[in-house]
Image: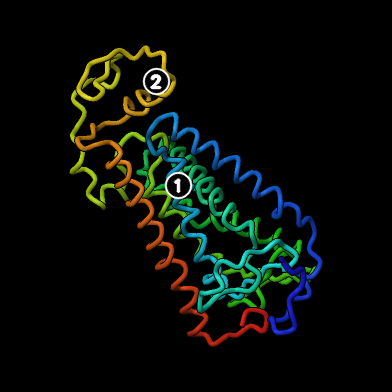
């Protein structure tokens, strides 16, 4: 049973979090919206018989959510106990109190939306100034992420959903009592999300992205020999026309027709390799670039928190 307020043996709750506003946003709206998006991504993958960009980003993002609580411990972030909680991560040595139940759903959606936005903005700079995508993302990283993170974190800390107490480095305390840090960790958040978006590449899928090439998936492919604009495609060695009564077959043909390569191993094995490449990259990079710095800086500074012991 979820407790609204901690037991006597639990750490105290920051006063700003005892009576948060609009708890339903995270207890209901985020899980419902997240579930709808996840179901749509799964349905699209089933129709195409291919792991789509959206599905891979959702699954990979969802897979790293368990590390959030360790990073929160490192930055003195504590959530209001008024939210529905889960207790799946109590085994971790460093974790923040009150792991909210909405977190997996938020992770499954938030990072994918961020990647789409940052890549779309990057394309605008590419077309306007002739820049590479890497240069465009480097230019966008700090201003876009800082503005977005400050907006989200500012609203959350003002509403009493969560707070950084005391936080590390300069901070701003609202009249409601919530506290938001201004440099650490909001500056750190300008790095990993943009890097992972760059590695993932811009949807729709046209070629192997940086993660897939790093794992050597090109050895399972060969350059496409036919003209991508040709209305006749080669499927399983047989030449067929694109007009098919099956929606699934048409969707699969549309996906494969956009690629600049052909797969030379059983397709299910190739898609499994793609899932492994995405999953491992997300797990390792998130841990090294976000969790490790947060935990190390808290230990190095010696700054402690009565609310996140």
Q: Residue furthest front?
A: 1
Q: Residue furthest bottom?
A: 302
Q: Quadrant of the N terminus?
A: bottom right
The residue that label 2 is drawn on is: 250
Q: Say which of 272 and 258 sits in front.
A: 272
Q: Quadrant of the C terminus?
A: bottom right
Which element carries disc 1, helix, strand or loop? helix
The residue that label 1 is drawn on is: 57
* Residue 66 versus residue 125 in the image, above or below: below
With 291 as the anchor, is 237 left or right in this view? Answer: left
Q: Say which of 185 and 183 sits in front.
A: 185
* Residue 12 versus residue 57 in the image, above or below: below
Q: Which residue is depicted at the point 41% across and 55% down?
A: 195
Q: Position of residue 121 (x, y in %)?
A: 49, 42
Q: Position of residue 288 (x, y in %)?
A: 40, 68
Q: Kindly indicate the quadrant of the structure image that contains residue 252.
A: top left
Q: Position of residue 131 (x, y in %)?
A: 37, 42
Q: Kindly indicate the quadrant of the structure image that contains residue 164.
A: bottom right
């Amino acid at each position: 049973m979820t407790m609204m307020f901690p037991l006597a043996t639990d750490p105290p709750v920051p006063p700003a979090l005892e009576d948060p506003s609009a708890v339903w946003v995270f207890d209901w709206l985020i899980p419902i919206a997240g579930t709808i998006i996840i179901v749509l991504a799964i349905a699209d993958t089933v129709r195409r018989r291919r792991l789509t960009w959206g599905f891979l980003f959702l699954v990979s993002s969802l897979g790293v959510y368990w590390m959030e609580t360790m990073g929160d411990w490192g930055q003195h972030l504590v959530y209001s106990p008024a939210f529905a909680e889960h207790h799946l991560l109590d085994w971790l040595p460093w974790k923040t109190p009150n792991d909210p139940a909405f977190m997996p759903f938020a992770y499954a959606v938030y990072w994918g939306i961020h990647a789409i936005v940052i890549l779309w903005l990057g394309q605008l700079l590419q077309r306007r100034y002739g820049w590479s995508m890497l240069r465009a993302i480097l230019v966008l990283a700090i201003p876009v992420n800082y503005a977005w993170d400050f907006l989200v974190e500012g609203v959350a800390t003002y509403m009493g959903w969560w707070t950084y107490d005391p936080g590390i480095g300069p901070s701003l305390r609202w009249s409601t009592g919530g506290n938001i840090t201004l440099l650490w960790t909001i500056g750190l958040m300008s790095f990993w999300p943009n890097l992972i978006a760059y590695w993932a590449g811009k949807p729709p899928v046209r070629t192997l992205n940086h993660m897939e090439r790093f794992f050597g998936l090109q050895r399972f492919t060969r350059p496409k020999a036919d003209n991508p604009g040709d209305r006749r495609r080669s499927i399983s060695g047989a030449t067929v026309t694109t007009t098919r009564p099956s929606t699934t077959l048409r969707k699969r043909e549309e996906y494969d027709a956009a690629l600049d390569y052909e797969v030379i191993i059983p397709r299910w094995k190739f898609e499994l390799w793609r899932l492994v490449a995405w999953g491992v990259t997300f797990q390792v990079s998130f841990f090294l670039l976000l969790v490790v710095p947060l935990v190390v800086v808290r230990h190095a500074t010696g700054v402690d928190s009565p609310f996140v012991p």
